């Protein structure tokens, strides 16, 4: 864990300028906000009187947004549709000053969009417009070629594989990126989903949530038991040759296990009491902070502590929003001094 305040401040200053390549499923998070004061006469459902529409970067693009907010330079790689929503996605990237050189547009796919209906500051309904079939072989090859070029030109400090089961991270793409990372000696962090859970081998950090571990390993896990969590982590360490396993436990905090030769150093970082407004996007924030810590050789327990704080911070706000760097630094200093 951190030994003094200066160590924390120095880490945050080093976030600035770190290059992070993010590959995975991108999407648009669309918000339709309104006021609810009556029930529809057509069905027992609330009527939302719309007063605002807002589009935001989502999925792996939200990871890029979090990294940008922390001062890093994100290099986003994905596939979107050659459609109106794809145009909007490029507009949003430009608005946030995030490059699009790693984004491929395809006539055979659509741009994933999640519409969230917000009434009286509460989410009432979500409508997903998406395609979740795997990329065709030619798109896999095109994406890998582009990622290989970007790795060679940009020389990222860490690579994030952000999987939302929308078909961009196919087994072939995952394997290809990991091989490139080994060739260039770049650490890889993966945020998996059930479909390709066991496809992530020879990587530095594996960050599933509790549900994904249960589904991926087909076993029950007690989030309050260090032994139960460590048993699951050991299976991942051994089967997938992963150095660090970080499991997010929702309101129970974060579990982290570091494999050091033949021994393990597991710990549970408890969650802090907060007023939770929306858990959407918290996982994106956690992996963003953890990846920067990994790139800067931060200890596993310090990494988990900061990632846990960051995930909690964004849950206090409605909607998918990136973490605020100054707020996170302030909370980390308060925690170090025993105030939180």
Image (cartoon, rainbow, N blue to C red):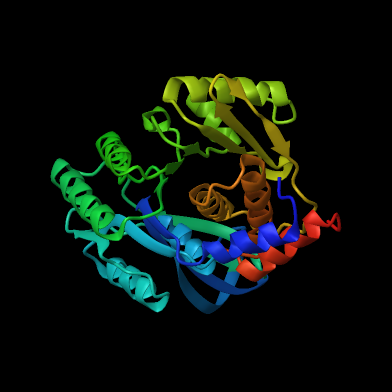
Tell me, yes or no, if residue 266 can be seen here.
Answer: yes
Identified at 37% across, 45% down, the residue is 186
**Is residue 4 shown left or right of residue 160?**
right
In this rendering, is residue 79 above or below 47?
A: above
Q: Where residue 195 sits: x, y (%)?
A: 39, 33
Q: Where residue 94 sits: x, y (%)?
A: 35, 76
Front residue of 46 and 277:
277
Tag count: 0
Front residue of 198 and 147:
147
Tell me, yes or no, if residue 321 can be seen here.
Answer: no
The residue lying furthest to the left in this view is: 138
In this rendering, is residue 76 above or below 179?
A: below
Q: Where residue 40 sits: x, y (%)?
A: 60, 66
In this rendering, is residue 141 above or below 265?
A: below
Locate the N terminus by quadrant: top right
Identified at 41% across, 43% down, the residue is 187
Residue 299 position by quadrant? top right
Identified at 16% across, 50% down, the residue is 142
Locate the C terminus by quadrant: bottom right
**Is residue 219 shown left or right of residue 309?**
left
**Is residue 136 shown left or right of residue 290?**
left
In this rendering, is residue 270 above or below 54?
A: above
Front residue of 144 and 27:
144
Residue 35 position by quadrant? bottom right
The residue lying furthest to the bottom in this view is: 51
Q: Where residue 217 sits: x, y (%)?
A: 51, 22
Front residue of 24 and 201:
201
């Amino acid at each position: 864990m951190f030994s003094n305040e200066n160590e924390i401040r120095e880490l945050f200053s080093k976030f600035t300028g770190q290059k992070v390549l993010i590959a995975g499923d991108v999407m648009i998070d669309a918000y339709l906000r309104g006021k609810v004061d009556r029930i529809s006469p057509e069905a027992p459902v609330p009527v939302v009187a719309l007063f605002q529409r807002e589009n935001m970067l989502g999925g792996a693009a939200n990871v890029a947004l979090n990294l940008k907010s922390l001062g890093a330079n994100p290099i986003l790689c994905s596939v979107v549709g050659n459609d109106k929503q794809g145009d909007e996605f490029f507009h949003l990237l430009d608005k946030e000053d995030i490059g699009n050189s790693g984004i491929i547009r395809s006539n055979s796919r659509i741009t994933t969009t999640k519409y969230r209906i917000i009434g009286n500051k509460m989410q009432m309904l979500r409508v997903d417009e998406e395609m979740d079939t795997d990329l065709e072989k030619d798109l896999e090859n095109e994406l890998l070629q582009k990622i290989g070029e970007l790795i060679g030109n940009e020389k990222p400090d860490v690579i994030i594989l952000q999987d939302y089961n929308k078909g961009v991270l196919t087994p072939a793409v995952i394997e290809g990126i990991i091989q490139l990372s080994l060739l260039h000696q770049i650490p890889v962090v993966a945020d998996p989903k059930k479909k390709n859970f066991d496809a992530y081998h020879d990587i530095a950090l594996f960050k599933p949530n509790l549900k994904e571990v249960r589904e991926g390993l087909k076993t029950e896990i007690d989030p309050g038991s260090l032994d139960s969590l460590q048993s699951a982590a050991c299976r991942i360490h051994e089967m997938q040759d992963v150095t660090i396993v970080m499991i997010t436990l929702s309101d129970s905090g974060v579990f982290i296990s570091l494999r050091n030769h033949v021994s393990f150093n597991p710990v549970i970082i408890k969650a802090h009491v907060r007023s939770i407004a929306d858990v959407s996007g918290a996982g994106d924030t956690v992996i963003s902070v953890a990846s920067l810590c990994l790139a800067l050789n931060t200890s596993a327990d310090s990494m988990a502590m900061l990632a846990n704080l960051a995930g909690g911070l964004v849950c206090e706000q409605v909607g998918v929003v990136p973490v605020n760097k100054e707020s996170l630094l302030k909370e980390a200093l308060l925690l170090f001094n025993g105030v939180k």
